[in-house]
């Protein structure tokens, strides 16, 4: 009789284990947000204001470049495309963050999570490639100015802009397709403010050694882009220092200062997030780093491009004057 009960108990335990293994997660829960009773509404208002500023600021930069004929050159074309990418880059995450801050149910479906990762990182990849193209443009302009008009033609500029976006979106498809085939059977808490590769992969009910491979792939892509930009600027600085007049050096450097600032902010925060491999940070530090490259970097970009550039400030004033004239005529 005891053997019969033992057999039944073993069968029941096996059934429970099987049912736990086949349990399918249909949504993820974000655990990186403060609770509503802990004052999450205090974070909602500044984040909402920042998002509105990012969208408005980058739209102003984009239309200022498109309207002012003097800015129809490769450098400003790259800046306008970059500004447009920044709007979509932040839209991939911030609206969901805002929703989670005022909602008790801070969840996202698996499909929604995959789409958020795809668009966020595809747009980030496109921006990284575009920053590399911008560095090459500045290199040619300063190190080989006589051949600049024949090298950086409008056709090449358009090809580099389109190629940055197309490659940025295509290169991530295999990775997202692979993640979509992984089984998720619990737990389902993402310890981050948005869906990202490492937090999601750690929830997969399979061998997580692929996380290291993912880290290596991301590290190679980041380091390769940083090296190209760094080598370009080392050469640029070398050439600038050889310019005899102080005024000439200042003018040459001013054309690169904005791009250099955006490059340091973008790749600095991205490197902190994705070049740490097995190193672990406290949750609060993880959240701060995520906010740096997902929110703060896009927030400062339109400020850097408008305040550090005389031509851009003139174009923005012209755009705002046109808007006032349009409003006056409409009324």
Image (spheres, rainbow, N blue to C red):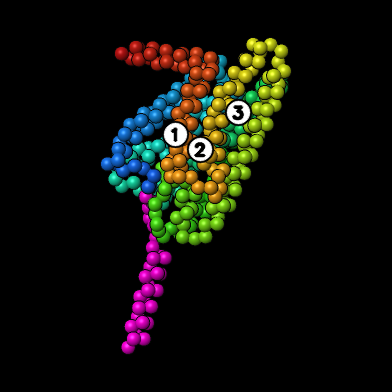
The span picked out in magenta is 1-29
SS for dot 2? helix
Residue 128 visible, this angle: yes
Q: Position of residue 309 (x, y in %)?
A: 54, 17
**Residue 166 horizontal side relative to residue 330, left or right:** right
- Name the residue beneath numbered marker 3: 134
Return the x and y of residue 208 as percentages of the image width and height.
Answer: 52, 57
User: Which label belongs to residue 167?
Assistant: none
Q: Secondary structure at mark 1?
A: helix
Quarter-wise, where is residue 53 in the image? top left
Secondary structure character of the magenta stretch overall? helix
What's the residue at 64%, 39% (across, down)? 224
Q: Is residue 20 magenta?
A: yes
Real-space CA distance between mark 1 and mark 3, rounded to the nearest whole angstrom: 22 Å
Mark nearer the N terminus (3 vs 2):
2
Determine which residue is flagged by label 1.
Answer: 295
Relative to 309, is 31 above or below?
Answer: below
Residue drawn at (39%, 65%), measured in percent from left and top?
20
Residue that label 2 marks:
123
| Residue 198 forms part of the magenta stretch | no
Figure label count: 3
């Amino acid at each position: 009789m005891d053997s019969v009960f033992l057999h039944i108990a073993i069968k029941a335990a096996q059934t429970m284990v099987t049912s736990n293994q086949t349990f399918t997660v249909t949504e993820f829960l974000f655990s990186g947000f403060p609770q509503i009773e802990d004052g999450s509404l205090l974070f909602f208002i500044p984040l909402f204001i920042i998002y509105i500023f990012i969208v408005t600021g980058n739209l102003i930069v984009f239309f200022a470049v498109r309207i002012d004929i003097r800015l129809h050159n490769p450098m400003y074309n790259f800046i306008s495309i970059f500004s447009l990418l920044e709007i979509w880059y932040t839209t991939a995450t911030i609206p969901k963050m805002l929703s989670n801050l005022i909602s008790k149910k801070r969840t996202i479906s698996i499909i929604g999570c995959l789409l958020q990762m795809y668009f966020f990182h595809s747009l980030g990849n496109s921006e990284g490639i575009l920053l590399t193209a911008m560095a090459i443009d500045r290199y040619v302009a300063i190190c080989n100015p006589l051949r600049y008009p024949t090298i950086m033609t409008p056709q090449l500029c358009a090809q580099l802009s389109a190629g940055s976006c197309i490659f940025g979106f295509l290169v991530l498809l295999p990775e997202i397709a692979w993640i979509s085939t992984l089984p998720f059977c619990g737990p389902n808490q993402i310890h981050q403010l948005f869906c990202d590769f490492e937090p999601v992969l750690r929830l997969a009910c399979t061998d997580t050694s692929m996380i290291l491979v993912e880290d290596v792939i991301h590290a190679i892509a980041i380091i390769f882009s940083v090296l190209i930009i760094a080598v370009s600027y080392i050469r640029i600085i070398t050439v600038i220092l050889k310019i005899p007049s102080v005024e000439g050096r200042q003018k040459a450097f001013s054309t690169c200062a904005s791009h250099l600032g955006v490059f340091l902010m973008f790749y600095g925060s991205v490197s902190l997030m994705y070049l740490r491999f097995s190193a672990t940070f406290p949750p609060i530090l993880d959240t701060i780093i995520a906010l740096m490259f997902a929110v703060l970097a896009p927030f400062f970009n339109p400020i850097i491009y408008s305040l550090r550039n005389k031509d851009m400030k003139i174009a923005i004033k012209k755009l705002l004057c046109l808007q006032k004239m349009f409003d006056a005529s409409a009324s």
